[in-house]
């Protein structure tokens, strides 16, 4: 974020210098020395051009100042990203209005021209326009933000960019993995997809956690109370080690639980449900298994595991 703020400060300086130069040009073209060299007939055109460029420069200068405030005051990455996108978009829109006023003396003619172009482009660019409308919907509806893990139409991953026309995610799982780790591939899909497909956002009301579960197969003759205690002990310890600053109230809210279910074969499954960050599902499952299996194996008189050819 510091680098982004530094870059914004650099552009503020550049736009400020350009704006000062354009003001100087606006007044210099009125001097006799320039008029005798360029001719008086070009003076109004040069003044209007320098004024238009000055206004455009001030628009982008203002957008950079607003962007700097957003970077400094907004702590949520997704909100910051959306606000910066909106600021950039508004700067482009206002700049186009200035360009139109420069090109067209008659505002009625300009409106008619833009109306005709909009009609033609509306038919030719239906898909991009729909994606842009979907971007506006995303900004206000907040179906997902940058940094969220989402799933849509078979794609699952972490959102890294929401542009005006498409969304980019870092794929998780995919064709080559069966866990929740990032595959290394980038998936891009048009924003219009959100208007016709369901979106699963892992950043739900329990944020930053979701609930996951891991099963261990044990024999029916096992001491189920002992198995439950071991699972709870390991899951709770791992959670507190990872998040030591949580209040007692939140620790109680995200307390793990164990339940048992019959397997379709000849054994039972002890299932531990626990909170986990979406990006840590594989790691947390591994830590729980590595912690609980030695405890269970150390008590063969209390815990038996399924045996036989069927396993």
Image (spheres, rainbow, N blue to C red):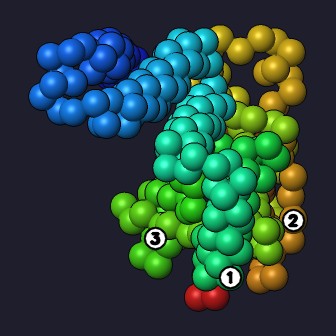
| In this view, 31 is above or below 232 | above
Q: Is residue 281 visible?
A: no
Determine the image quadrant of residue 19: top left
Dot 3, crowdedness within 10 Å: few (<14), some or many (≥20)?
few
Taking the image as shown, residue 205 lies to the left or right of residue 142, namely right
Q: Nearer the viewer, residue 119 or 107?
A: 107
On-image quarter of the N terminus: top left
Q: CA distance from mark 2 to mark 1?
A: 57 Å
Q: CA distance from mark 2 to mark 3?
A: 28 Å
Dot 2, crowdedness within 10 Å: few (<14), some or many (≥20)?
few
Could you say where residue 113 lies in the image, as x and y percent from the top left?
64, 64
Query: Which numbered tag is attached to residue 177?
Result: 3
* Disc nearer the start of the sequence (2/3): 3
Q: CA distance from mark 3 to mark 1?
A: 42 Å
| In this view, 224 is above or below 244 | below
Q: Nearer the viewer, residue 277 or 37?
A: 37
Dot 1, crowdedness within 10 Å: few (<14), some or many (≥20)?
few
Q: Nearer the viewer, residue 242 or 21?
A: 21
Identify the residue position indicated by label 2 in the image.
261
Q: Nearer the viewer, mark 3 or mark 1?
A: 1
Residue shown at 46% from the left, 70% from the top: 177
Q: Nearer the viewer, residue 40 or 3?
A: 40
Q: Nearer the viewer, mark 2 or mark 3?
A: 3
Taking the image as shown, residue 257 lies to the left or right of residue 98, namely right
Secondary structure under the numbered disc 3 in the rendered image: loop
Identify the residue position indicated by label 1 in the image.
123
Q: Is residue 249 visible?
A: yes
Residue shown at 58% from the left, 55% from the top: 164
Q: Nearer the viewer, mark 2 or mark 1?
A: 1
Could you say where residue 64 lies in the image, as x and y percent from the top left?
47, 22
């Amino acid at each position: 974020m510091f680098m982004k703020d530094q870059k914004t400060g650099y552009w503020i300086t550049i736009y400020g210098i350009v704006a000062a130069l354009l003001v100087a040009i606006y007044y210099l073209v009125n001097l006799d020395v320039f008029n005798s060299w360029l001719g008086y007939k070009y003076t109004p055109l040069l003044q209007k051009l320098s004024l238009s460029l000055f206004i455009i420069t001030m628009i982008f200068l203002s957008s950079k100042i607003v962007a700097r405030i957003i970077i400094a005051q907004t702590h949520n990455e997704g909100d910051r990203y959306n606000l910066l996108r909106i600021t950039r978009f508004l700067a482009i829109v206002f700049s186009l209005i200035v360009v139109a006023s420069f090109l067209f003396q008659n505002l009625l003619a300009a409106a008619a021209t833009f109306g005709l172009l909009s009609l033609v482009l509306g038919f030719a660019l239906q898909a991009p326009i729909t994606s842009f409308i979907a971007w506006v919907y995303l900004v206000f509806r907040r179906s997902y933000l940058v940094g969220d893990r989402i799933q849509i139409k078979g794609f699952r991953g972490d959102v890294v960019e929401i542009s005006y026309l498409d969304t980019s995610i870092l794929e998780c799982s995919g064709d080559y993995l069966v866990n929740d780790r990032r595959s290394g591939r980038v998936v891009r899909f048009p924003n219009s997809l959100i208007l016709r497909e369901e979106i699963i956002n892992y950043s739900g009301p329990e944020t930053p956690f979701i609930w996951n579960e891991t099963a261990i197969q044990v024999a029916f003759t096992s001491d189920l109370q002992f198995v439950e205690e071991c699972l709870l002990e390991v899951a709770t310890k791992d959670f507190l080690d990872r998040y030591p600053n949580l209040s007692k109230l939140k620790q109680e809210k995200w307390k793990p639980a164990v339940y048992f279910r019959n397997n379709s074969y000849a054994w039972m499954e002890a299932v531990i449900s626990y909170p986990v960050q979406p990006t840590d599902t594989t790691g947390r499952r591994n830590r729980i298994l590595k912690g609980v299996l030695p405890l269970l194996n150390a008590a063969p008189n209390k815990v038996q595991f399924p045996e036989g050819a069927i396993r």
